[in-house]
Image (spheres, rainbow, N blue to C red):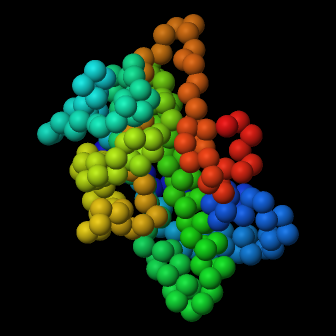
Amino acid sequence: MPVYHAPLLQIDPKETRRYAGLMNAKEFDEQMILDACEDGLLLAEPRGIWTLYDYDCAAQTVAAEPPFTIVGKKIGAHLAGCDKVILLSATVGEAIEDEVTARFARGEYVSSVLLDAAATTAVEQIADGMEKAIAPQMARAGYGMRWRFSPGYGDWPLDQQPEMIRVCHCKDIGVGLSDSSMLVPRKSITAIIGLYKVEAGKEEHATPKGCAACGKTDCPSRVTEKND
């Protein structure tokens, strides 16, 4: 179960704007977004962990001990043809969300929202970095990678999050669950990546990802998505 400790060198202001729901707010002060990204860099404590498992595609079962059977047709379809999976978790720690809460309590609502969006951007960037680090290893073993899929996407129920915590070994990076089954620290993710054998000279058809794979068409974060 490799632990990922690569530094976070920047937080993408464009993605921060998107997560803050400001993609159509053309007159919004860009410096406020840049300041939120800088504050996020100072507060973030990036950590990640991942584990490779065999996967029974027909039964939708991860060969953990004990096994973990995944529920949901969309996640099943997404992992079709895979015989291994990577279970991963990433977090930016508690300090950044504590500051979000403190700013909100002081009435600094805009600053709080922007820092929260920067934290969301940061944890996604950590997960992206993990994928980039893992991909060459999997390629050397003859595997291609599907894009990561998290509980709550499609019809994969959030009530499987406790199993994800277990099989991802999330406690090793300080990630757990609240009494209401929400991830703690809040700016954390768990996800699964399907691995499929690459056939020489044959390229797998790309599947929709991100906003294009989500059925929530009224989300303000997708207003500028051009490929939906």
Q: Is residue 215 left or right of residue 12?
A: left
Residue 192's spot in the image, x, y percent?
39, 40
Q: How many badges with numbers are in the image?
A: 0
In this view, which residue lies farthest toward the top?
A: 201
Residue found at the very far right of the displayed protein: 27
Q: Is residue 195 visible?
A: no
Most foreground residue, 15 or 20: 20
Image quadrant where residue 180 sits: bottom left
Residue at 37% of width from left, 42% of height from top? 156
Compared with 186, 77 (above or below) is above
Residue 153 lies in quadrant: top left
For the question of whether residue 78 can be seen, the reply is yes
Which residue of the protein is positioned furthest toward the bottom in this rendering?
Answer: 106
Image quadrant for the N terminus?
top left
What's the residue at 67%, 37% (across, down)?
A: 228
Q: Position of residue 76 (x, y in %)?
A: 37, 29
Direction from residue 109 to residue 161 in the image, left or right = left
**In the image, is residue 8 above or below residue 151?**
below
x, y (%) of residue 162?
25, 53
Q: Nearer the viewer, residue 31 or 7?
A: 31
Q: Residue furthest front?
A: 218
Left/right placement of residue 172 relative to residue 4 reads left
Rendered position, 168 above or below 92: above
Residue 112 in percent (x, y) is at: 59, 78
Give the side of residue 21 with respect to residue 154, left or right.
Answer: right
Q: Residue at x 43, y 60 (%)?
A: 188
